[in-house]
Amino acid sequence: MDLILEGIKKAFWLLVSFDPEVLGITLLSVKVSGTATLISLFIGISVGATVALTRFPGRRLAVSLINTGMALPPVVVGLFVTIFLWRNGPLGVLGILYTPLAMIIAQAVIATPIVTGITLAAVQQLPGKLRLQILALGATRLQMVWILVKEARLSLLAAVMAGFGGVISEVGASIMVGGNIKGYSRVLTTATVMETGRGNFDVAIALSIILLLLAYLINLVLTQVQQRERPR
Amino acid sequence: MRNMKKYSYAGFMFFSIFVLLVNLGPTAEAQEKTLILATTTSTQDTGLLDVLIPIFEKKTGFFVKTIAVGSGQAMTMGRKGEADVLLVHSPAAEKQFMDDGFGVTRRLVMHNDFVLAGPDEDPAKIKGLKSAAEALKKIASAQALFMSRGDNSGTHAKEKDVWKVSGVKYEGEKWYQQTGLGMGQTLNVAAEKKGYTLTDRGTYLSLAKTLKLGILVEGDAVLLNIYHVMEVNQAKWPKVNIAAAKAFADFMVSKETQEIIKTFGVDKYGSPLFFPDAGKKVEDLGK
């Protein structure tokens, strides 16, 4: 119990003193996970809406694969991204293993199925007559998709939160493809693992508290946007 | 107007992703200036590298990517050409690495020693024994819990050596458990479960304040823990940054660095964590 108090004190101190190292680690966490979430939104919303609105052979299989992808273990993603990005691997020419960019790629791979799955469910849930109505009013197919996506925006914000929550809290892939390099690819989760290993439990607790605060703040903003409209 | 807003929003997202990617991507020049150091967890967990790396970077202009894994994995990275230089402590495996032609040079950097740590209750009564093998025998016959790293690290390799000397069967026994984690975490597990474990003294000392584990057996010659620096052979893997690797290996055995190693940890733990050995012979260590 003392340890937790000690950690809270440490977290407070690290925050008010604007410790440059902790600040850098926190900013990188936001940058990496934020970018990964943005990428996953582009891919996830387009793929999710497309699958939700079309009928094609093997669709069930595709949906089940997407839903399984929502449970994709980060370490598995980390392992495969590492193998691909190795200097002497298939994408070795890029030379991006152990960089924040590699972490963004891995996290985008983790977040995309989550966003896709939730988008799919959200768009599919809209009443079918809505589509006919929109088309009858003279919208093009693309305009229709856009309106439907907008109609599902409350659920899509949930997709953003789930995707971002999934990657900001993820450690397995980040430590493998980022390498936890000081001042370069160290994020809140990988730093927490390292400080725990070093026995610096107070710092580890402090970093965890900062991570929780960060997740809370970002979700608070998203929730504000989501709940701006009264429930219908 | 609404449409305008929509497009500028999408445009802003694209733009921000683009900016971030450009910012975070490496340039060709940056790659030439980058050194991948694969090393053991002990050099990172003790904080030694946090002191040495910034000095090296400032001096040479190279950017060091330190990947702290077990010695076994570090050497696998070297064998695959995924690291430029290795700082490891698993002599038998290192010799194999050199014999197989994956390394260019192998230089002695420093040593400390391994110790057997365990709970104060000491159920196997090993405290004060002079022989580590004897201690393991007693642990085996008492069936007292022993936590192994189990990760092919240098410490794990040493542990297996000592078990071999002791001649007792340990693999698959109920009291013999493997964590598969780094040294720091394994010590924490051992402390929590009141088990024995073999640890390097450096990591033990840096964690001692939070651990309820004591040093029970130390000083046996078999427990010497020796660190070498090895440059990976560019002839095997053309992408290896040999210039940077050589600079780092030279730096580790330089007089200035050896002086830092000699005093590292004294202010915090009252005794040094490592003993500098550049230029010495392995046979002369610990005398």
Image: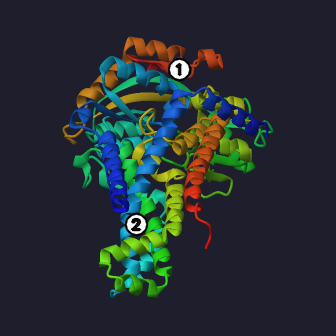
Q: Is residue B215 visible?
A: no
Q: Nearer the viewer, residue A155 or A107?
A: A155
Using the image, determine if residue B245 lies above or below residue B263: below
* Pointer 1 chain: B
User: Which amino acid does the dot numbered 2 rest on?
Assistant: Gly
User: Which amino acid does the dot numbered 1 rest on?
Assistant: Gly
Residue at figure coordinates x 46%, y 76% from the top left: A123
Using the image, determine if residue B173 lies above or below residue B90: below
On screen, residue B11 versus residue A18, left or right, reads left
Where is residue B54 shown, x and y percent of the image? Answer: 42, 22
Q: Secondary structure at mark 2?
A: helix
Q: Nearer the viewer, residue A101 or B104?
A: A101
Where is residue A64 shown, x and y percent of the image? Answer: 45, 79
Q: Secondary structure at mark 1?
A: loop
Mark 2 vs mark 1: same chain?
no
Residue at figure coordinates x 64%, y 37% from the top left: A206
Q: Nearer the viewer, residue A199 or A108?
A: A108
Which residue bears the numbered disc 1? B286
- The mark found on residue A55 in the picture is none
Where is residue A120 shown, x and y percent of the image? Answer: 45, 75
Other residues around mark 2 within 10 Å, as few (<14) / some (14–19) / many (≥20): many
Q: CA distance from mark 2 to mark 1?
A: 61 Å
**Quadrant where the image shows the N terminus of chain A:** top right
Where is residue A124 shown, x and y percent of the image? Answer: 46, 80
**Quadrant where the image shows the C terminus of chain A:** bottom right
Residue at figure coordinates x 60%, y 15% from the top left: B266
Q: How is the image coloured?
A: rainbow
- The mark found on residue A44 in the picture is 2
